[in-house]
Amino acid sequence: MKKIEIITRTFKLDEVKTALAGIGIKGMTVNEVKGFGRQGGHKEVYRGAEYQVDFVPKIKIDVVVEDDFAAQVVEAARKAAHTGQVGDGKIFVSTVDEVIRIRTGETGEEAI
Amino acid sequence: MHTDLPPSAQRLKTDRDALFERARGGAVAGFPWEYTHLVDRYFEERVTEIAEHPPDFALVAVGGYGRGRLCPGSDVDILLVFARRIPDSAESFVKSLLFPLWDLGLDLGHGVRTVADCIALAGKDFQVLASLMDARPLAGNAEVFQKLRDTFEAKALRGHGRVFVQSLRRHNATRAAQYGDASAMLEPELKNGLGGLRDGQQVFWLDRVMAAIGADPVFLPEELARLREDQAFLNRVRTALHLCAGRKTDRLFFDLQPPTARLMGFAAPDIAPEMVPEMASDMASGTASNIAPERAPQSSPEATGRAVEFFLSRLHQAMTRVKAMRQAVFQEAFPVPGHAPRATIRGVDMDGRGVRLTSRRQAAPASVLDAFLESARSGLPLTWDTRRVIRDQLPRIAEGLTDRPATLATLVEVFSSPRSGPACDGLLETRLLPALIPEFAKVEHLIQFNDYHVHPVGRHTMATMTRLAGFASSEPDLPAAPITGTDTPWAREIAAQIPDYSRLILAGFFHDLGKNEPDHCEAGAAIAAHVLDRFGRDPEAIDEVAFLVRHHLLMAKTATRRDLADDGVISEVAALVRTTQRLDALYLLAVADAMATGPRAWNTWSRSLLGELYFKARRQLLHGLAAEPDARRRAETARAAVLAATPEAERETAEAALRAMPPRALLALDPDTLAGHIRLVRRFWAAVAQDRMREPSTPGGKSTDALGVNGEGVNLVEAGPGPAEGTYRLTIAALDRPGLFATMAGALALHGLNILAAELFTWADGTAVDVFTVAEPPDTLFVDEVWPRVSRSIAHALTGRIDLATRLAERRNSPLARNGSSPRLRPLVSVHNRDSDAFSVIEVAAPDRIGFLHDMARTLAGHGLSIHLAKIATIKGRAADIFHVRDRAGNRLTDPDRIDALRRALLAATDPA
């Protein structure tokens, strides 16, 4: 199983969610997060003084899927989140050892 | 873990598992109904299990479940409908009803509403209205359901019907943009693509709306019955696809096509057709495409390929019919208001709904053709009832038209019209064109994976002619044939010079009709000559069209495979073509052909290659070979120009540099570029000297410098705009050594750079100056950061600090690399010595992958060959790489044993596993 963490623009949440639902993703966890990437945030002007906004608000979507589905999920998420401008975000893929559904006790891919 | 499942769910689980098992074994035909039945039974039993008193609700199946068409991955959508008020107990009831299904892993959608809620929602959201179209009672109170049905009919259909139709029309525009025309795609979307299941559903929905508002139906009952069959077929494909993918997916990806075809019963062709129900029904209805499969072992890729081709062609035909009916019902029952052009030909009427024959009882063959002409001029389709007349009386109409010069003239006029799209669709869909020209029918549905074309031949032919018509049209950019973007700006100018454009249109028509034969160009020319003779064309015109068909690949093949800096290559083309008119025609044909093939065949890069060849050949045809300076004189001129532009003080070193350059540099590069190379090489040697000084190559000396020891890692990368939009030219200088090109190609691949072409200039002083044309790097915003990273990777690879082969393999094996999504074809390697006087030309075609060029170049270097020119084309996942090579002594590769050894080594290297 793979965990896919999608960090995207806040206004892209709906598009990414729809795209993932469209390929058969059944559940996801969404967080409001802050951070910065290669641009180091962006500059804003307050009362004539320029100051650095270090942390830009983003949305992080976590989904866990079967191994052979990961590529398709990443592709769909990337397509939906893409604008081509700086700040489109990142997608991280990592391996998940085990999943348990609390209500039933099911484990493994059954529990995703 | 399902110990607490209620008996109803337990039973559903057991029966569902058995049903899936049978379906995976090949029984997909009855699946949707059987699965629906199992879920229906669950709801009936479950309601009895949990309902305490006589139900005051209706449990209703909606959407695909309501239609009784559940595929393995379909959502099960239900509604719990109450007459007036939703009681508090509804929530816990729904939980008891649905939780067991959740636990079984079904995808559920549900709503709890009153009848009034349903109707109000349907008025606001066309998707809700659509889902209620297929409402079907499952359990509960029959009166409540009846009330829902009556109110829906009276209020939603009659009240909102027209708004619903407009919403669907807008929705279809979105579908076209998002999913494309599935009826002509190699990876069609079965549900939402145009021609997909959604189209067929819309026909039935609109039929109901029309009945509710009292409009005349467009289709006959038997036509709707045929549509039901096509829909059932599409649903079976979707079922098989879900089973093969193991999840809900509606796009028929390449890698899923062979298993899906196999599950559908489309097996290797040496199984008799009568054993395969799907194939047999095809044969019986006479719609089978005429693919004559050769006998091949069942498991061979070729046999599988043919079974998949047959399956796809059957699928495309069904989708084409479905799409035609959906378009017709919108066009005729709900025409877009606007001004309707008036018919200009006698015997033909026209209004906003389309073009129709004035007299439909005994349609005069000539009038039928006129109707298509009117359709092509106006861009409006023939009305469905006119098309029905043509279909019903096809033999008589075709007989009255066939082999007559006037017929051919009108057809050419139809094809030449810039708005010919609907007319062409109609000519195919009524089967009139295939009846008139059986040679077309033979290849119409043929799909060839082993070629550049991504559409079936019939569609590709029509698209090619539409492009040609667009070039000659004075109207700017019609939506049917937009030729902006990657258009060639001079195509219109050239088209205006062509004396008889009908010949070019005919060449477009015939160019691929020989596709069934091994040499399709020659076969196509023969077909063209035969058909044109039958239709009474004069011999001179026939010769001309046959010539264009025979050589329709000349321009594209020469431009992408051969060295355009070689005068011999240009002379060869000029000698074959002989006149500028023919060159013009072949050029336009090549452009239209590539554009109709798709964005991978027609892009800024292929446009620039084709343009270069066209203008070079044209210059030679206009001014003659003798007027062109020969190679030696041209080299001399270039040398003089470089020296003239060099400051006095540097002239001596420049002269030495020019002597050190390989002779081809002076022919292939312009003086500015040559001067640039000289400056680059000077800087390069300075860097090498510095490197050697800083980092003496003492034994055991610890090298911490990124450039390595003894200058062996030193390289300079210069980047600039490439010859075509969206390309870059990288000039890289390094110390020459065997395998250098492979290293550079590998390093570029590591940074996601797609190499389009490479020219390698090895100087006598041991410098290699390699010029790469690459497509845009993945990061177009920070392009300048890419080149230093490339340079660093090259240095690291040259000094052994990174192992390119391993790094490339890591990339290739990433879980995110979608392997096997392109058709698997056998790799091909060929070695020619006739394409160039100076080099052997090696062509490798194989499935593309990360690091492919690196592995090919490494293999060539391993066989003692140095590459001087490489041209790389990647079409739909297939790499076609051309290498101009010589051995170290500067000779071509002629020894058959060595050629054979090289060929085997290259073939082995195409597959890294």
Image: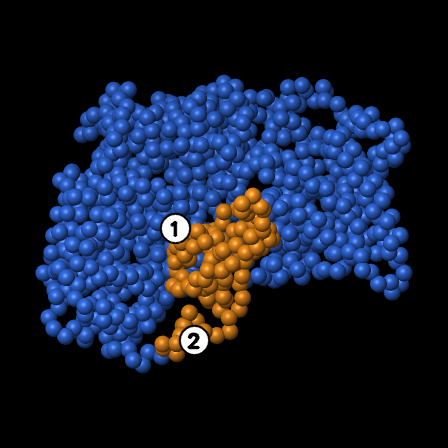
Chain colours: A orange, B blue
Residue A89 appears at what percent x and percent y?
Answer: 53, 54
* Residue assigned mark 1: B189
Q: Secondary structure at mark 1?
A: loop
* Residue assigned mark 2: A100
Mark 2: amino acid: Ile
- Mark-to-mark CA distance, 2 and 1: 34 Å
Quadrant in which the C terminus of chain B is drawn = bottom right
Chain to which mark 2 belongs = A
Say left or right for B137 vs B250.
Answer: left
Residue B840 appears at what percent x and percent y?
Answer: 71, 42
Residue at coordinates 19% horizontally, 54% vertically from top-left? B118
Residue at coordinates 12% horizontally, 66% vertically from top-left? B56
Q: Give the numbered dot on residue B240.
A: none
- State the image quarter where residue B100 is shown: bottom left
Chain to which mark 1 belongs = B
Q: Secondary structure at mark 2?
A: loop
* Neighbours of disc 1 within 10 Å: few (<14), some (14-19), many (20+): many
Quadrant in which the N terminus of chain B is drawn = bottom left
Residue B211 appears at what percent x and percent y?
Answer: 15, 43
Q: Is residue B250 visible?
A: yes
Nearer the observer, B33 or B212: B212
Say left or right for B568 vs B543.
Answer: right
Residue at coordinates 40% horizontally, 72% vertically from top-left? A110
